Image: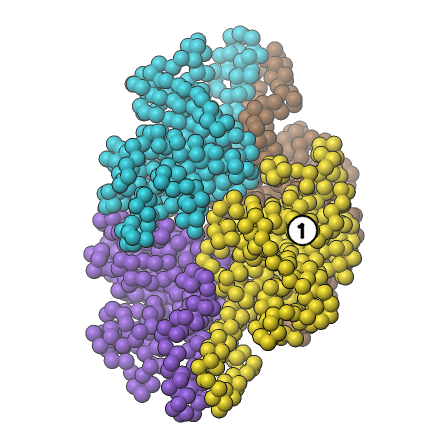
Chain colours: A cyan, B purple, C yellow, D brown
Amino acid sequence: MINIRTDLAVEAKEIYESENKNTKNRIPGVAVKEYTENDIKVTDVEILNEAGEKAMGKPKGTYITIDMPKFTHYDSGIMENVSRVLSKSISNITNLDESMTALVVGLGNWNITPDAVGPKVISKVMITRHLKQLVPDSIDEGVRPVCGIAPGVLGITGIETGEIIKAVADKIKPNLIICIDALASRKMERVNTTIQIGNTGISPGSGVGNKRMEISEKTLGIPVIAIGVPTVVDAATMANDTIDLVIDEMVKQSSGDSEFYNMLKKIDKEEKQRLIKEVLNPYVGGLMVTPKDIDMVIDSVSKIIATGINLALQPALELDEINQYIN
Amino acid sequence: MINIRTDLAVEAKEIYESENKNTKNRIPGVAVKEYTENDIKVTDVEILNEAGEKAMGKPKGTYITIDMPKFTHYDSGIMENVSRVLSKSISNITNLDESMTALVVGLGNWNITPDAVGPKVISKVMITRHLKQLVPDSIDEGVRPVCGIAPGVLGITGIETGEIIKAVADKIKPNLIICIDALASRKMERVNTTIQIGNTGISPGSGVGNKRMEISEKTLGIPVIAIGVPTVVDAATMANDTIDLVIDEMVKQSSGDSEFYNMLKKIDKEEKQRLIKEVLNPYVGGLMVTPKDIDMVIDSVSKIIATGINLALQPALELDEINQYIN
Amino acid sequence: MINIRTDLAVEAKEIYESENKNTKNRIPGVAVKEYTENDIKVTDVEILNEAGEKAMGKPKGTYITIDMPKFTHYDSGIMENVSRVLSKSISNITNLDESMTALVVGLGNWNITPDAVGPKVISKVMITRHLKQLVPDSIDEGVRPVCGIAPGVLGITGIETGEIIKAVADKIKPNLIICIDALASRKMERVNTTIQIGNTGISPGSGVGNKRMEISEKTLGIPVIAIGVPTVVDAATMANDTIDLVIDEMVKQSSGDSEFYNMLKKIDKEEKQRLIKEVLNPYVGGLMVTPKDIDMVIDSVSKIIATGINLALQPALELDEINQYIN
Amino acid sequence: MINIRTDLAVEAKEIYESENKNTKNRIPGVAVKEYTENDIKVTDVEILNEAGEKAMGKPKGTYITIDMPKFTHYDSGIMENVSRVLSKSISNITNLDESMTALVVGLGNWNITPDAVGPKVISKVMITRHLKQLVPDSIDEGVRPVCGIAPGVLGITGIETGEIIKAVADKIKPNLIICIDALASRKMERVNTTIQIGNTGISPGSGVGNKRMEISEKTLGIPVIAIGVPTVVDAATMANDTIDLVIDEMVKQSSGDSEFYNMLKKIDKEEKQRLIKEVLNPYVGGLMVTPKDIDMVIDSVSKIIATGINLALQPALELDEINQYIN
């Protein structure tokens, strides 16, 4: 069972494999399917049972991962393709029904650029619930009622994010909740290039901000789709992985010198933590590693996700109709 | 009774007086008190009864107006003075009790600079409720539990702002709600220079954004303090007032020429609306008049209000303790 | 000859026509051509001689006006079409030569959203001059050397914008200068919907900011293409036009009542100025009228213009190659 | 002689000392003075001769380092104190003369938050040169002519930043140039807490952005004061230092086991680079480590530096006069 947290199923899979080289990469209780759609790589990870939950450190359910092609954020054509694949993935794990109301929840802190993906998506989602209620005649039959909130993070509101969502959900009784969240990745190569869609909700302590209470069908009584995109690598994670890398390197070079091998083992968890603190002092916890053009990229990621959600929730509309509506 | 909407009691007063020149400025059912504090002009308007409500077009209650001195936004010393006067005004119309929980609500749309005052205030308010719950020992006895939300506006969420506030309030049961809202003024000279504090809540359809459901003790069952600051003049209002000004001017000049006077009357409401539409076409409704340095000024206004609220809600703390905490 | 300033040739034309109804709209010394390209309306105004200069209040030369279709800013397809029409217009009034160096100048104040179009365009233009100099082999033959600056405005730099441009131009000796500037329109309907391309440079006192020294081939010794987009209506202009509208309306209604007609005349320039001051007090000069979604629209306008410039300056490259390069 | 680049003299000093433990911390050709002013720690490093240049890897001259107290960015009182110390440091290494003109240059890229300090400072500096020229009577005798530019970075302009500065300086002939630049630190604890003032200009390749051509009295013929503040740690630097830390740790633990010691030596430069690449792939070079509240902190740092410059350049004015002027 793994002891390193990750929000991404594909990373949990990699970690498991790296720690179980002899298993020829077959993970008990987990089904993996890789395929390509509009030249975009998609990986479905299905956690089937307790064995899978134990191996992956994640609850039973479906986790779809979309890899954005290089240059996505600089080519509106590719952006649209990714949105369409996202839209299809959302539809695949939900039962969309004509009359249902969807609540889109933008998690994260709008004051911290890499954590602002959720709130930014909300401002780009096609919001219709109020029109269906206030001016039903002015809006097409086919348009579904959609509403959205950006509840903020515990540090800014003083209220559990889950409490706010539950309070609003109890009041407006949506049939589906879609949560968008910025995640932390272990690998720079995944930052702003990966989108994960899952049907198991948001597990505690994820993301750049902090969300304690689980947000899932179990806690809310409504199906919850979680869309996550890694936008940063935590600086402590990066330091930790760098240390591991150095040690691995030495182990390779030490060619079975047991005395030395044991010495390396001395660099244990506490030791590592101390070294990391030393590197990051006095900021431990508050630091993140980001690409320099983060503002631009976050805007692009938000647009891609919002468009994917709009296409999934409004199958009766064409993309240009949706975009004009958002005017 | 007046037919022109305004969010500001001092403007309602002016309008009444301009329409009732012969009353020697005494308004039935309204008590007005003007005074100075730290060189800052304060006006208390008390609406005492139905006659006052009718004359002012506002519900019974207290409306305190603070006039910021010139250059406030360019002098951190004056900013602090205004915050202290605001803090005192808030305390005067609330019963602060050691153990009470306050919910601060930042109304408005964070994507539209002049409407973002509320959300910006939230991110500068000292939020403590979660700490009192999660790590009570790490925080002083004297610190009061405070939480905050920025519920967004109907057009972005598809949910009545009042519904969201009520849902959250029902869940966390605060003893006091403080709402901050950007207002529209009729006069440029009030934009970003006036703060109104009232104990009657927010009346429908106010502000730059749109809030339909009343937010008040009546609807929420909890005392509601409303802090409003005019940040724009609606362009339609400005056009309307310009037209009136021209007509008044002509009336003056027409020296009782009745034939002409009647002709002027021809420029009636519908006519005016047509002229305004012509000026603002095709944007009617979506236009605002703002000073050019709006971004900087909105930051300053938010800081002043947040500091005022922090001082009022945390009487046990000094300003520098509060500022360091917000770190 | 007209006495009302406008930066837009199409507006100068309208003003002339409204003041010379009897001329059946033929303007001496001016040739006007209207046509459509990719469903986009384009108007070429050619000022041929002194008579035309006098009638239009603008120097001899070519002024191309592009009208963006409705919803342009919400449809990336239409955005690309507008960019391609802009690109063609730029090419039509310049002699692009393989080896030439272009200097793109983003005029305006990056701290004032509606004045920030120029600087925003610079950050989206494909900049290559340094690569041609430092790593010539890493970059295609066909790529032209392009450089750019955002010189700021007099109020922020204390230096005439023209002086800065001349200083830089004298040093790097470009063969072409393209200036992008945010303009003030007289009509809301043109705000963020019109692009003007001209070959006569920027005349003094234009725009939202203030640029005193003329920026043109005459002052710089290098051909200057000016791309202007109206992003605001000056509040004083709006008040002025509203007053005129009211007076016109009354003139219509006064049915030749000479006593009254003369009375209307009494509302002369000085009188108008006094009324406008009264409406805008104390902000005269510092106020602008903008749509509420100004931030989003300015981003879109900047992208459209930058793409048009990139396509015009890099005919050897496809749009997706350009976008990837800007990565 | 050191082989690790750093922009900060205090870091160069530390590196020298850590590599020359036996020298009892006396550095040849370098005079160090530490003192406190308004409770703020100041360190003067004087590089006196070639020996000092060799030891420090920096040109002969004076380097003043100001350490901001904890919480500076959350306490406007401390912010003012730091500004006053900065002002005094600037005055100490310049000969201010009544009639002189100062050009303030804000280096860096305004699109990358931690690199935008320079441009942000420019928009807060008291700019007067144009008024002294255009409306001399409207402005006090005692006010000095000051102008400013934000020339951008090579990647955005395609022009050497030094070329732009030289072009402008040759034209307007200032008597003093003050450059503000965001630096990269080796230690998180210095990020946004340290200000360095030097009289040797900006050396090539410094900072977050890239500036190739030296900006100094040597290249410009005018005294150049450089004000630098570290706003990020380069991610590659952090990875590198982490690796060193691990190796040092092991060396300590290996207790002179020569076989092992030699093995550690195997982790040489190339090896390190490979490891770093592996950690940062595919982003090498484009990554930075920043605190999460970077936007707010950068605003604060810019205000502190601008105020320090304003106080130094306008000794005839009080701080509140300056702030009101900037209105």
* Residue C128 sits in quarter: top right
- The residue that appears at 36% across and 74% down in the rendered structure is B269
Q: Secondary structure at mark 1?
A: helix
Residue at the (62%, 20%) spot, across then down = D271
Relative to B102, A41 lies left or right: right
Q: Position of residue D105 (x, y in %)?
A: 67, 53
Q: Circle 1 is placed at which residue position?
A: C90
Q: Is residue A162 left or right of residue A253?
A: left
Residue D307 visible to the viewer:
no
- In-front residue for pair D207/B179: B179
What residue is shown at x 45% (from left), y 22% (from top)?
Answer: A35
- Residue at image x 32%, y 58%? B211
Residue D77, given in percent of the width and then of the height, sits at: 49, 57
Where is residue A26, by image quadrant? top left
Quadrant housing the N terminus of chain D: top right
**Residue B178 seen by the camera:** yes
Q: Position of residue A107 (x, y in %)?
A: 37, 40
Amino acid type at image mark 1: Ile
Extreme-front residue of the structure: C24
| Up/down of C98 relative to A275, above or below | below
Indicate the chain on which mark 1 is placed. C
